[in-house]
Amino acid sequence: MHKLTNLLLIVIFLLAGKTAEAEELVKDKSCPRLESKIVKRIHIPKKYHEGLFLDGNDLWVCNGEGGDIWVVDNLSGEVKQQIKPIADFTEAITKKSEGLYFTTEWKEKKLYLARVSGDRLEATAETSVAPAHPAGAVWTGDKLYVIAWTRGMGTKFDLLEFDGDMSLLRTIHIKDIQEPCQMSWDGRDLWISSWFDKTIYRVDPKTFKITGQVASPADRTTGICRNGKYMYLTGTYSDLYKIEILQEADMQISVTSNAFKNGGMIPAKYTCDGDEVSPPLSWSGVPSGAMSVALISDDPDAPNGDWVHWVMFNIPPDEDGLPEAVPAEARLANGAAQGIGTGGETGYASPCPPSGTHRYYFKVYALDRMLDLGPGVTKAGLLKAMEGHILAKGELMGRYKR
């Protein structure tokens, strides 16, 4: 019996080891270094900067031990408001919903759900993560992820996954990031900064594999905030940096049509020689965190340069395409809006090349927000509004010759 008991214990231990291995955050076999460039350096007052959170044009900066939370204009670096935290060592803040925020408190070893009352945060709920110290935190829309440091004989780093009520769902051991600090969420991936090695890591939340890494210009990198193709970041006593991540080839939307193949001829039905109705379009690969989809169709082969045939925005992100013959109306039943093309028309303007074979591109963009634009917006206006908010994009090209 004693031998049988020992055998059962060994089996349980081995099974537990396999489970633990499956719950580790590790580097993928192919983990490329993503190219980036500094777009802007934004001077802000010196303090012990920790987590960042972007709310519109405002960056919220947590200031660690004894510091307030700053609301900073992301263009000028001006501190517009100072908010008193719940305790005296705020590591991170992330927005759950309008008026409600999750925040981490290092010394208290607690997570709080809080609201802003005047110039201070007030707790509405709390939970302890003791014996760990919580650092970075981010809300993805259905999960709260928190980086936790457990000190002792060698510090252990974990990624804690909570639901919206701050109930712990699981713990993922962080194996391949030294001193993970703060986090961001771009609608598809988690991003984790390393205070130790000036690197930011991209993490797939489905597999918990590190799928890319970006060098940081900030010493002792702490707060990060991914926003479309840009990322804001800071470090201990550092300024803010706005960087552009250049290598995002895997974040692509697949755009197709059952009327023509990519690079194929567009049927006359969808041109000035036919019914002049828009072709059916389908797409896939819109990130789960996208708030809207936009569309631009243009012809780069026009005699006077780029000719815009279609501008549309605020398409619901859960729709996977457009039907044939979209009405030429400024506002559509699904909430989308249509702008105007080069010819001044609202909605789709059919191909009608004066000579030769022209290319017509149908470009689809997944955005991290709805756009506050009027129906008369042009391609240039739409591109301007989308700057810094594109999560993924894709295109379909068709040809036509009269």
Image: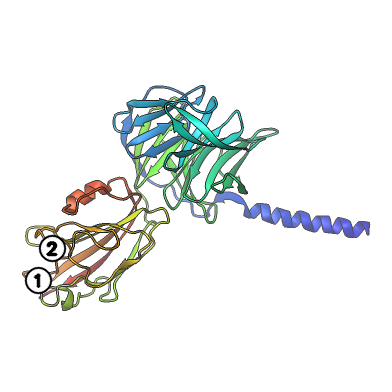
Badge 2 marks a residue whose secondary structure is: loop
List x then y, in percent, for residue 192. Answer: 49, 42
Depicted 159 relative to depicted 294: above or below: above
Query: Viewer-proximal residue, 59 or 333?
Result: 333
Left or right of 103? Residue 340 is: left
Q: Residue at x 55, y 26 (%)?
A: 87
Q: Residues within 10 Å of mark 2 (few under 14, many from 20)?
A: some
Measured in 3D between alpha carbons, the distance from the residue under mark 1 to the one under mark 2, in whole angstroms, is 9 Å
Q: Residue at x 47, y 38 (%)?
A: 101
Mark seen at residue 188 = none
Quick check: marks 1 and 2 in contact, CB under 8 Å? yes
Q: Quadrant of residue 158?
A: top right
- Quarter occupied by the N terminus: bottom right
Query: Viewer-proximal residue, 298 or 263?
Result: 298
Dot 1 or dot 2: first in sequence order is 2
Q: Amino acid at mark 2?
A: Asp
Query: Viewer-proximal residue, 402 or 26?
Result: 402
List x then y, in percent, for residue 15. Answer: 73, 57
Left or right of 283? Residue 341 is: left
Query: Viewer-proximal residue, 62 or 19?
Result: 62
- Quarter occupied by the C terminus: bottom left
**Is residue 180 visible from the viewing direction of this image?**
no
Badge 1 marks a residue whose secondary structure is: loop
- According to the picture, the residue beneath numbered tag 1 turns out to be 356
- According to the picture, the residue beneath numbered tag 2 turns out to be 301
Q: Residue at x 56, y 46 (%)?
A: 165
**Is residue 348 visible from the viewing direction of this image?**
yes
